[in-house]
Amino acid sequence: MNYAQIVGWGYAVPSRVMTNLELEKMVDTTDEWIRSRTGIVERRIAGPKETTSSLGIRAAQHALQVADLSPSKLDLVIVATTSPDYPMPSSAAIVQDGIGATKAGAFDLNAACSGFVYALSVGSGLIASGQYENILIVGADTLSRWVDWTDRATCVLFGDGAGAFVLQKTDSPTGLRSCVLGSDGSGVNALLVPAGGTKSPISLEQIQNRQNFIKMKGPEVYRFAVNVMVQAARQALSAAEMSVDDIDLFIPHQANIRIIQSAMKALKIPPEKVFTNVQHYGNTSAASIPIALCEAIAEGRVHQGSHLALVGFGAGLSWGAAVLHWGVSTTSVPETWWKSMVRNVQTQEEALRLFALKAHRRLELAGLDAFRRLSNGHDA
Ligand code: UT7
């Protein structure tokens, strides 16, 4: 039987920190309101040149390094995002090119803030089926670009970032133990960006009405979030034939500390078993669970044999919960000089291969163009 083991992890956030005090100068809010209603103290905001894919690439490079895997060994790149670089093509294609995953397929997956749990489920399933051996899953969002910086009800909540994990085929029973994915599309209006899609293409009128920004019915999403987190976590635990006591660490979607506390209280999970970092990053959407998981690993809270529960929720409305058995050591071994040299050579090799591929495509296009001009000349 095949199992998908997590063998590499990494995250990336912009260096620009935006504090609540800064927001006080932009909208009618206070540090006290934001802290007490959400738990958020600061968030990271992408610089002008940073995008969902550029953050995804940085996170993926860390993950590949931890996995000690050449990007050419990847079979598939999945990017969970709700804020892609372009409406098309996918951000996954840009990540695939950026890391030199020359033999991988690539696609985006949009399940909003639940996206990472969805990607984990899809990636693990494709490995379990025997179709693929190495899959990169990335959760990345740059919601600061969708945020209306004049709307105090939403602009204080979101931040940017990316987290990436390498899934690898193994025959030892590890990885995903259970997964619950859900959707209630009747709640589409509770949290959405109304314009910019095919229903309401971007126009001057839409921009003037600020319809190209996130609109959210906060209290409605709040109630949904608490209920669905409790329900989905219970279902995932029951599918894994486990109880709350069997879980070493809960990693919930980091949207609001009050949502997390209410759900964990209802599930009777003690605070020391819950990882939170919402205070530092705000809600980074699809990146929130993977960033939290990476930080939990770095803090020594995940070990070989640990059982983890991940629970996400978001626009859609969507939700996802997973129980994971962690199969590898999380103690970082310093990279030897020769390993780093081999990796550098491999990276150079991939860069060369990509360069040759792009040059070939240019030559082909130039040849086609010359041929067209020649045949047009003959026709004339
Ligand atoms: O990934 C999923 C994404 N979304 C979420 O998880 C969001 C879920 N919802 C929430 O986290 C909460 O609903 C919020 C944090 C968004 C809002 O907290 P709330 O306790 O539900 O506040 P509210 O929307 O009921 O607003 C209470 C008051 C209102 O004033 P009035 O009408 O009582 O005078 C708001 O206008 O707070 C006001 N308010 C603010 N005041 C200061 C709303 N935003 C702010 C603000 N600063 N930033």
Image (tube, rainbow, N blue to C red):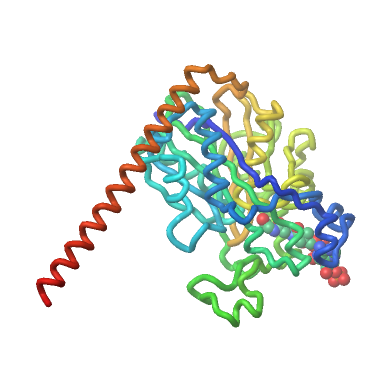
Q: Tell me, yes or no, if residue 228 can be seen here.
A: yes
Q: How many marks?
A: 0
Position above or below: 265 against 1: below
The quadrant where ligand 1 appears is: bottom right
Residue 55 percent location from the top left of the image: 57, 46
Would residue 285 be found to the left or right of residue 107 on screen? Answer: right
Residue 279 percent location from the top left of the image: 78, 46
List the single residue furthest toward the bottom: 205
Snapshot quadrant of residue 307: top right
Q: Quadrant of the C terminus?
A: bottom left
Tell me the residue at 49%/30% (across/down): 5
Tell me the residue at 54%/45% (across/down): 56
Position above or below: 240 against 287: above
Residue 356 percent location from the top left of the image: 31, 42
Residue 377 percent location from the top left of the image: 14, 72
Q: Tell me, yes or no, if residue 319 can be seen here.
A: no
Q: Which is more toward the observer, 178 or 243?
A: 178
Q: Quadrant of the N terminus?
A: top left
Position above or below: 168 against 358: above
Tell me the residue at 50%/48% (across/down): 79
Position above or below: 294 against 18: above
Tell me the residue at 64%/68% (across/down): 213
